[in-house]
Image: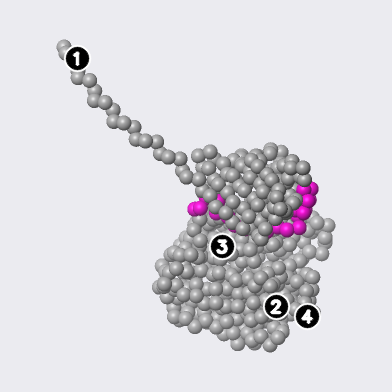
Amino acid sequence: PPSPPPSPPSPPSPPASPPPPPAAGSVVIFPGYNLSWVVRMAEGEIEISIDALTNGWVGFGLAELGGMPGADIMVASVSDDGIAQIGDYWASGYFTPQLDESQDWTLVSASQSDSVTSVRATRRLDTNDRQDRSFDPSLPIAHRVIAAIGATDTFVYHAERAPATVDFFNTVADPLAQIKADPNISTLSYRAPDYVIPPQCSTEYGAQAPCTGGIADCIQTCYGTETTYTEFCFPVTLPNSHIVAVEPVVDPRSSRYVHHYQVDLTSATCAERSSGGDDAAEELTIYIAARETGPLALPEAAGFRVGAGTPYSSVVITIHYDNPSAATNVVDASGIDLHYTTLLRPHDAAVLQLGDPNVLLANAPMPPGLSRWDFFCPAVATAAALTQPLTAFARFQHMHKNGARIVSTQYDATFTTLRTSATEYFDFDFQSYHAQDAQQWTISPGDQIVTACYYDTGASSDVKWGLAGQNEMCVDYVYY
């Protein structure tokens, strides 16, 4: 039989997809320290460039929340005779970091000129090294970095250092940009009215008094000699509205003394709070943050309800001031901006407080050295309190100066683990929202949550539970 006709030629293969373009950018971490970078996704590497105003060493690192403990650090220097060095380090605390077992940074170039040290170096995005942190393109928030410089080439604990957030992959949108651009969203601004931070508390622990300087609707409470909790109350007169973002504004004159904020809506008037007549008031916590935390933008489907038709008529900003050096004449005008809309969203938001939010352990002693304290939210509690699952969208974990680690584990009714959220290297000065909790998750009736707080009090036997900076707390705030 005749041969079959030849098959038609195959269509040409589509051209290969071009490699993803490199992500690049630059930022000034602090005056005299410029950081720029190029991410080459096809090669799986990042190249960073640092130009720093020093003739000594320069350092750059990835941090958990902005502090030294647990940071992955690169240090480079150029000697007077032009010899360059680079090292890969791991920090376990506020002391000189130690060299990694695996050196994963490669020096491309380094030079010094006119008191400026310039360094270019590359590294794999993910080194699979347990002493390294990864540059993660899937991270839903910007990476937290630290930068530092030294006066000499000898790498010792630094004199100038700063944390920052950097979007290395140009994928993280500004959480407030869309909100501020929306014509249907307005802003209320509240500030402490030039409050003078007490140099030292002279009243007994927990004693309340009107604020000094004749500031109206202001109450200050002493907890020890160096800690003051000051409440500033402001009336809120709005139509029925949703607060969709809370933006902290920390006064640069006093930022080192402002440790953290708590913002509450209350049904009490400011006059009732000042006179102590608010015991039956209904309150809703809407924001908890330390000075490095930054703004909270709620999901598009939710907001904190306030205004006409709600119980809430006032907003109270409580600021925890720490003044261990008893500095005098320190004036603070920190506060918040509340971004709100009258176009109500589908869901009302609130905050679930786990651990010991009411400090029921106040004055209980902590043992010297290392200890762990577990707090249970049992299945019977969530089953009784919830009629449907909660959609959680952010978490803020809080302890004080002796805090070392905090872990919250969510189980179902059979104690099958559903979720674990942890601050592995807790730092009193750097507390913020976690990338691991930036994606929404569910808490269902019958779930149970264990909040475990770890402490290191050293050799001290004087540490107790309480509200002062030198006391201890354990609170896990879950926004839903």
Which numbered marker is on residue 478? 3
Distance, label 4 to label 2, CA atoms, is: 21 Å
Quarter residue 315 falls in: bottom right
Q: Nearer the viewer, mark 4 or mark 2?
A: 2
Q: Nearer the viewer, residue 372 or 162?
A: 162
Q: Nearer the viewer, mark 4 or mark 1?
A: 1
Mark 4 lies on residue: 203
Distance, label 4 to label 1, CA atoms, is: 107 Å
Which secondary structure, mark 4?
A: loop
From the viewer's perspective, tell me whether residue 268 is left or right of residue 319.
left
Q: Which residues are magenta?
A: 150-171
Amino acid found under the numbered disc labelled 1: Ser
Looking at the rendered image, the quarter that the N terminus falls into is top left
Quarter residue 167 falls in: bottom right
Question: Which residue lies at the image location 57% right of the left edge and 78% below the top edge?
Answer: 190
Distance, label 3 to label 1, CA atoms, is: 75 Å
